[in-house]
Image (cartoon, rainbow, N blue to C red):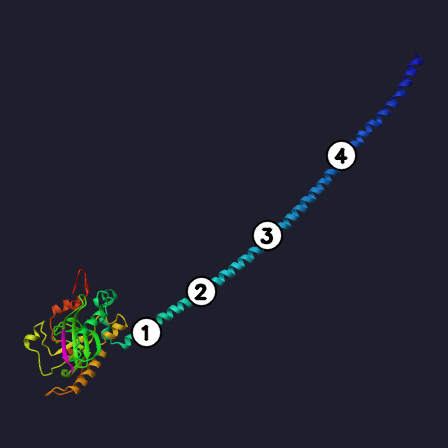
């Protein structure tokens, strides 16, 4: 038994190293594998971490560089665009300023020229006659300004000229006659070889209502100048006129002086028609200065051809005030203010 126990113990001792030896390598291989796996994991993680870090750093750097480039490019583009806009805006403002300056200079130049022309016109015309001009709205009311009216009136009055008595026509004028009570009346006046013809023409009905013939060889005095009234008169009249006398020896009677409808006065007084400033044609047609010159020339020729027996031949021309012997003149004031002596549109009435 002792031998057996010893054999058994020896066998156990023999078997024990074997088992240890056999178990030792098995236990060591997994540990090595574990270590190797951990090292690989650590190395892979470190490598991945390094690679990720490098990639992140590279990506961040690339993004930063790209962002910087974009920012720089955007800033440069914005700066260039802003510069172009500023330059374009500055050029546009400069051009606009130049255009405004040129337009303003041209407008000022035109305004200066118009003022100079207006000053020249005022210098060439009598200042006292400027106040006779009416505004365009009132001028349109005159029937003589209607298209074709004046031409028809001239044809009608020319047909009344007697060639055998009056001779050929020298000129036609549109004027206003001022009577001894300061009443204005619209008249057409014609100068011929032998006569001074004064027509009262109805521009509404195209009819001649009255005609007065004055032989030129009877005209002995022509007075031109501004109008005047007696000292105690409350009337006044601006502008200038022409008075034609054909019998200096005959004085108007007392009844004629106080009769507003008297027609036996030995003179006629004319002044400018209110439409004389409408255009150049009416300015020439209403020019009393030209009328006075042509009347003087025609009268002198008539005196030379047909002298009047027992009467001094020749025409006396005087530049003096034309006196109108009217004191209160309420009728003339109302009539002249409302232009009752002219053919005008007056609502539903016209005369």
Q: Could you give the CA–CA distance between mark 3 and mark 4, rounded to whole angstroms?
A: 46 Å
100 relative to 209 in the view: left or right:
right
Disc 3 + disc 4, Cβ < 8 Å: no
Please report whichever mark, 3 or 4, sits nearer to the chain's N-terminal start.
4
Please report whichever mark, 4 or 1, sits nearer to the chain's N-terminal start.
4
Q: Which mark is residue 71?
A: 3
The residue that mark 2 highlights is 97
Q: Which mark is residue 117?
A: 1
Q: Could you give the CA–CA distance between mark 3 and mark 2, rounded to whole angstroms?
A: 37 Å
50 relative to 212 in the view: left or right:
right
| Corner quadrant of residue 225 | bottom left
Q: Eyeballing the image, is 298 above or below 283?
A: below
Is residue 214 a member of the stretch shown in magenta?
A: yes
Judge by depth and name the residue closer to the eye, 334 or 108.
334
Measured from the top left, where is residue 86 in percent x and y? 51, 60
Q: Eyeballing the image, is 92 above or below 243?
A: above
Measured from the top left, where is residue 214 in percent x and y? 14, 79
- At mark 3, the secondary structure is helix
Instruction: Please report the bounds of the magenta region as a residue range.
Output: 211-216
The residue that mark 4 highlights is 38
Please report whichever mark, 3 or 1, sits nearer to the chain's N-terminal start.
3
Q: Could you give the CA–CA distance between mark 4 and mark 2, rounded to whole angstroms?
A: 83 Å
């Amino acid at each position: 038994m002792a031998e057996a126990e010893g054999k058994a113990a020896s066998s156990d001792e023999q078997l024990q190293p074997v088992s240890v030896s056999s178990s030792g390598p098995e236990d060591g291989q997994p540990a090595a594998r574990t270590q190797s796996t951990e090292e690989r994991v650590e190395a892979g993680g470190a490598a991945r971490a390094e690679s990720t870090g490098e990639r992140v750093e590279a990506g961040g750097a690339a993004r930063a560089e790209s962002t910087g480039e974009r920012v720089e490019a955007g800033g440069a583009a914005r700066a260039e665009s802003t510069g172009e806009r500023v330059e374009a805006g500055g050029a546009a403002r400069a051009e606009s300023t130049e255009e405004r300056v040129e337009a303003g200079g041209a407008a000022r130049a035109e305004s200066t020229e118009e003022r100079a022309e207006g000053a020249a016109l005022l210098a060439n015309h009598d200042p006292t006659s400027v106040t006779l001009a009416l505004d365009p709205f009132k001028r349109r009311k005159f029937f003589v300004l209607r298209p074709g009216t004046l031409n028809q009136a001239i044809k009608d009055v020319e047909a009344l000229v007697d060639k055998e008595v009056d001779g050929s026509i020298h000129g036609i004028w549109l004027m206003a006659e001022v009577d001894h009570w300061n009443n204005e009346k619209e008249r057409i006046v014609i100068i011929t070889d032998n006569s001074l013809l004064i027509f009262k023409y109805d521009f509404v009905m195209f009819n001649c209502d009255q005609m007065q013939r004055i032989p030129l060889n009877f005209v002995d005095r022509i007075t031109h100048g501004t109008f005047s009234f007696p000292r105690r008169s409350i009337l006044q009249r601006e502008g200038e006129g022409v008075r034609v006398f054909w019998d200096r020896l005959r004085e108007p009677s007392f009844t004629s002086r106080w009769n507003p409808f008297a027609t036996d006065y030995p003179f006629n007084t004319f002044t400018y028609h209110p439409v004389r400033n409408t255009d150049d044609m009416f300015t020439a047609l209403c020019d009393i200065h030209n009328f006075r010159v042509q009347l003087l020339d025609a009268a002198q020729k008539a005196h030379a051809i047909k002298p009047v027996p027992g009467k001094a031949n020749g025409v006396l021309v005087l530049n003096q005030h034309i006196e109108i012997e009217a004191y209160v003149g309420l009728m003339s004031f109302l009539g002249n203010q409302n232009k009752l002596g002219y053919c005008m549109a007056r609502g539903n009435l016209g005369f």
